[in-house]
Amino acid sequence: SMSSPHVAGAAALILHARPYDGLEVMRQVLQNTADPKLWNGNPALGFLDNVHRQGAGMIDIPAAIAQKVVVEPSELSLGESGATPTSLVRTVKVVNHGLTPVTYDITHVAALATGPFTFVQAPGLSYFAASAGVTLSRTSVKVNGKDRRGRYGTQSVSVTFTAPEAAALADRGLYGGYLVFTPREGGKT
């Protein structure tokens, strides 16, 4: 796959610009600044492609270099859907490596889901607009900048995910989506 050399080249450029970031921050920055793409089956419908197909999306090198705030963890794995919808609670932390405070509005956007046997190349490959229920402990967060002692500003947000109903997505189907942090002051979402 050509994605591996492209990601390696992007990582080299970003590490050159940000030599003091560790590997975990590098991964977070790459995923946090990626741009999810529309489903290639019919982009006109406006559905985001499956998360398990595109990951965080297309790498955005300039945004990754400029990004001062990261959301960790930068990905959440919730498992497969089952016969009975389940709820899972996860906490994400917003960490500001910059000097200025940033306020984010937090939302969720769903991506297309797939039925079981996703990776079987057969006519039975199925796509669904089945979204998980997402409840946020708060819909905005203000994260202070780094203080005089060098401590980063942090804020946490709890997120409750409820798997799609069995009627919307078959047992063992895969669903996904994105938590979206939109800065009020402008900048990279």
Image (spheres, grey):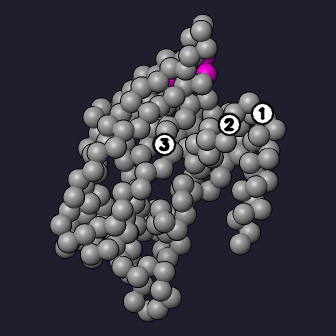
Label ID, residue 19: 1
Q: Secondary structure at mark 3?
A: loop
* Location of the N terminus (image quadrant): bottom right
**What amino acid type is highlighted by mark number 3?**
Pro
Give the SS element for disc 2. Answer: loop
Residue span colored magenta: 98-102
Q: Is residue 25 above or below residue 10?
A: above
Pointer 3 or 1: first along the chain: 1
At horizontal 18% and vertical 66% (from top left) the residue drawn is 84
Compared with residue 130, is residue 103 higher up or lower down, i.e. above or below?
Answer: above
Looking at this view, name the residue that lies furthest to the bottom.
123
Residue of label 3: 73
Secondary structure beneath label 1: loop
Task: Name the image quarter holding residue 80.
Answer: bottom left
Q: Is residue 129 above or below residue 58?
A: below
Q: Looking at the picture, which amino acid does disc 1 mark?
A: Pro
Q: Residues within 10 Å of mark 3 (few under 14, many from 20)?
A: some
